Image: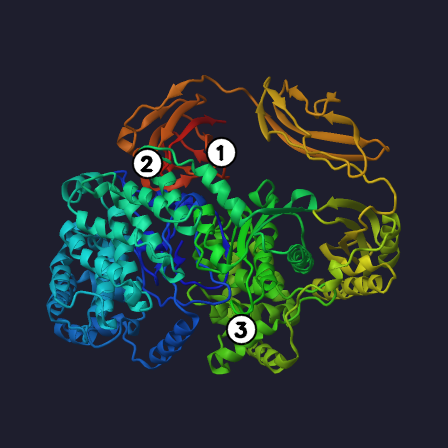
Amino acid sequence: MKKKCHTVHTSRMMAGVLLSTSFLFGMVDTPAQALAAKDYTSVIGRDGHQNVPPSGKFVERTLDPITLFQHQSSDEAGEYPHPVEPTWSVEEQESSSKTHQIMKANAQKYSMSDLNRLSYEELINVLVTVNWEQIPELFDFTPDSYAFYNDRQRVQAIIEALEARGRQYSSSDSKGIDTLVEVLRSGYYLGYYHQELSYLNQRSEHQKVFPALHAIADNPNFKLGTDVQNEVVGAFGGLIGNTTVSASLVEKAAPIIRQYEEQMDTFITQRSAGNAVFRIMGQFSYILMWRLDEPTKQQEFYGKIDTYLNELGNLALHGDTDEEKEWVLDNGFYHSAYLGEYHSNPNKGNEVLTEALELYPYVGLQYMQAAKLIQTVYGGKDAHGRDIQFNKIREDAMEKYLPNEYTFDDGSIVMKTGGDVTEEKVKRLYWAAKEVKAQFHRMAGRDEPMEAGNPDDILTIVLYNSPSEYKMNNPLYGYETDNGGMYIEGKGTFFTYERTPQQSTYTLEELFRHEFTHYLQGRYAIPGLWNESPIYRDERLSWFEEGGAELFAGSTRTTGVQPRKSMVGNLIRFGQDNWYTASQTLHARYGTWDFYTYSYALQYHMMKDDWNKLDDIMDYIEANNVDGYDRLIRTLSDDSGLNRDYHRTMGSLVDSYPDLTVPLVSDDYLVTPDPKASAAIFQEIEDVTGLQNVSTNRHKSEFFQTFTLNGTYTGTQAEGEKADWETMSRITDEFLTTLTSHPWNGYKTVTAYFTNYRVNASNQFEYDVTFHGVLPEQGDGENQPPVIVMSGPSKAAVNEEVAFSSNGSSDPDGSIVSYLWEFGDGTNSGDANPTHVYENHGEYTVKLRVTDDKGAVTAKSITITIEEQGGEIGEREQEPNNSFSEANLLKSNVELSGQTDRKDDKDTYIIQVEEEGIVQVTVNSEQDEGLNWVVFHEDDLDTYLAYPENAGKKLTGEFEAKPGKYYLLVYNTNNTTIPYKVIVNAE
């Protein structure tokens, strides 16, 4: 999937192999191609070396000062370092962006068809006088772009024009080099992705630009200085990133790096200079790391680019740690580490990092960045062969930056916070989550997870003290930090930081509500992990996810979802003449954060006035019905009435702006509830609501106990889902208002939602209703039931001894006196932590009942699948097996041991299928992350057909197979040594 390099609002992010914009494409402004873990191998060339896609259209990078995010597809990003991008002041970017938009709107546009009609000379004369953004079809594959680039003489004419102008440009006149470069880059980009233009993806074609690149580099104006010079330097790097590079060209860029380091105090505030240097470093590393095979590296580069590498080391060891220079030091660390093998002294990169550990303060940002790279690239050993004990370093850093941990809802929510984040703030965020959850489930109509057993069964929230300390998230967890926060669905974790009004016009609670909605979307509304299921493809859901996150950030306890003043203020700032149409909003993609506001406004309109449309959209998404969703979006896009009403809603919101607020939790949540018997609380709720089939549960949290009360509400005669939903929403709010009027102050913390709409035999609508609120600390003197923590494996084999555990179980006001395990096969045990052997295969429900010293009983259950025993054990991979031609044969039902590392990062196996059926693949890794696998058929070695259905140490998946040969590719994604075992079997 395409990863937009824009920094926009926060967003969902699936955890995968992070192919970062920063190091892969080296462009501050690129909509780069970050691939999910399973996508990574689809671009592995037939010769086995990694072949990562080139960068696409260069898009102006805008900084949202409030909640920034780089949208990316990843699975094990936390273990994959990547360099930090330069950031610029909000004022500078806003000014630049407004000027840019005005110029862009007024500029003449040229279609590829227009350009195709020009002679070569006329074409060149046009290109050198226009900005490349005046050619909107660049990087798009169309019949006209195919005709344009399929004319090899035309492409060569552009290259020759670039060479001529490379000799001619000055410090004040670029001679159109930037546009010429972007037109060429567009061609090489399309050649990578489209077979029809694949000639442009050949190294021999890429090398044809060398004369032009040398001409640019040999021009005495090839240095940092004016914006024109910086633009040319950046274009030089950009073209290399979409073609290739030579050792001599690398060395010619060394003076640029030296100049930036020596004059950093001057250039650090010059945006165009920073962008140019960042682009040079990133694009060079992209080629050297990902686009060259080992023989080419050996023959053409090793020992031949020392000057350039030395200058990178000087950047890393610059010493000045001013905040504005942090990105420079980080890039010096990163590129020194990953390109160090090219130096005539192969240990050069490690020497730079080792010296950095001595130069920079312990567990400071630079120290941690260098230590992380030593751990990742050099196996945790410094240049002298000493173990740096990275785990200890990380523990010390965690203790410094995230010393506090709070748990809520029986451990299903965990908050890790900086020492300056107050307990009051933590409590407010918890209760904000409950308000958002209630309104979200009302609209979604369900509160059961889409899939069981995903990482988001436990939501982890990491909250740093400040934007400055948030930068530690890169070395500690491995994620980019030029944003206001991000949710990593594959980890069930989101990261953010406390901020002051001077640092953000949005509050932390607003951001938290936005991110918590992403968690709810991924868990309850959208099937599969982020970007995994078909409904995610082509950014279909960008508008839905981000607009929904902004919408439900306005959730309240008793008055539904309210418009947020901060969002409506954006509509005013954009100007009515610039407002999106409904069609534009429904097709919005990452690239500008404006679409967050328009998507918010469209979903707000639908929820209030076009409920059925939003409900239909959510139904198609929940069902993963791509065709139905696409048909509906086409219909809505052509609906002039929807567009009219959408604009009326935006106008109404703007008119109401003076009276709007930003919904935040009230101080009532912070008040200690008065004593009251829980039975009385539950009875009052039943009396007020008339619910039937009521059940209750208690939940333990850091600062208080809470309850959930569930029951069935039977309404009046059904009038259709929309009318019944509106009626139920009104009734539920009335329930809450009535309860709030009761004397007990704890009712002011109660939220409620309803799910599972249905119509009974008497034609009455019914809903399942859930209430949540605080309980008095020690209740009313009544016995508090025990709390169960129950664990055991999800799978085991027949006749294998299976261990179950109740460790962590407790009783809040006494002690546990007995345990009763029921294993589902007619046997039981009274041990706290029993073992059991199953004699037959099948699925079993294991139940645990715990009794406390006052007779209260709590029960809980888990499911275990018992499989037949496997076959032989002890086979081992035979190297080399790095390509399809060298693949080892895997025997069915025989466990085989293997290992990947930085030098040997992939193993290939043959699966010979004799009969049609299901083939199951299991790879057991010794690490939680860093390993993945895919399966190819012998007739199509470019397209994988299976990949793991889960993350973690045990990577399992299956595929339907016909007789023939299949290839299993096990690959390493984080350059560390990872032993593993693999077994395949057919049903």
Locate residue 501: give its quadrant.
Answer: bottom right
Left or right relative to 220: residue 64: right
x and y, in percent, of residue 206 in the image: 18, 54
x and y, in percent, of residue 171 in the image: 18, 73
Locate residue 769: give its quadrant.
Answer: bottom right
* Residue closer to the observer: 775 or 326: 326
Q: Which residue is mark 2?
A: 902
Q: Amino acid at mark 3?
A: Asp
Q: State how the image is colored.
A: rainbow
Query: Considering the numbered disc 2 on the image, is that residue within a helix, a strand or a loop?
Result: loop
Residue depicted at 45% across the width and 56% down the height: 481
Residue depicted at 82% across the width and 46% down the height: 778
Mark 2 vs mark 1, CA separation in Å: 19 Å
Q: Can residue 912 be spotted in the picture?
A: no
Q: Amino acid at mark 1?
A: Lys
Crowd tier of the residue under label 3, counting other residues whose Cα lies within 10 Å: few below 14, some 14–19, many 20 or above: few
Query: Mark 3 against mark 2, which lies toward the viewer?
Result: 2
Q: Can residue 334 be spotted in the picture?
A: yes
Q: Which residue is mark 3?
A: 639
Crowd tier of the residue under label 2, counting other residues whose Cα lies within 10 Å: few below 14, some 14–19, many 20 or above: some
**Vertical side of 195 occupied by 946: above or below:** above
x and y, in percent, of residue 65 in the image: 47, 67
x and y, in percent, of residue 795 in the image: 58, 28
Query: Mark 2 against mark 1, which lies toward the viewer?
Result: 2
Q: Which residue is mark 1?
A: 953
Mark 3 vs mark 2, CA separation in Å: 54 Å
Q: Earlier in the sequence, mark 3 or mark 1?
A: 3
Crowd tier of the residue under label 1, counting other residues whose Cα lies within 10 Å: few below 14, some 14–19, many 20 or above: some
Left or right relative to 137: residue 684: right
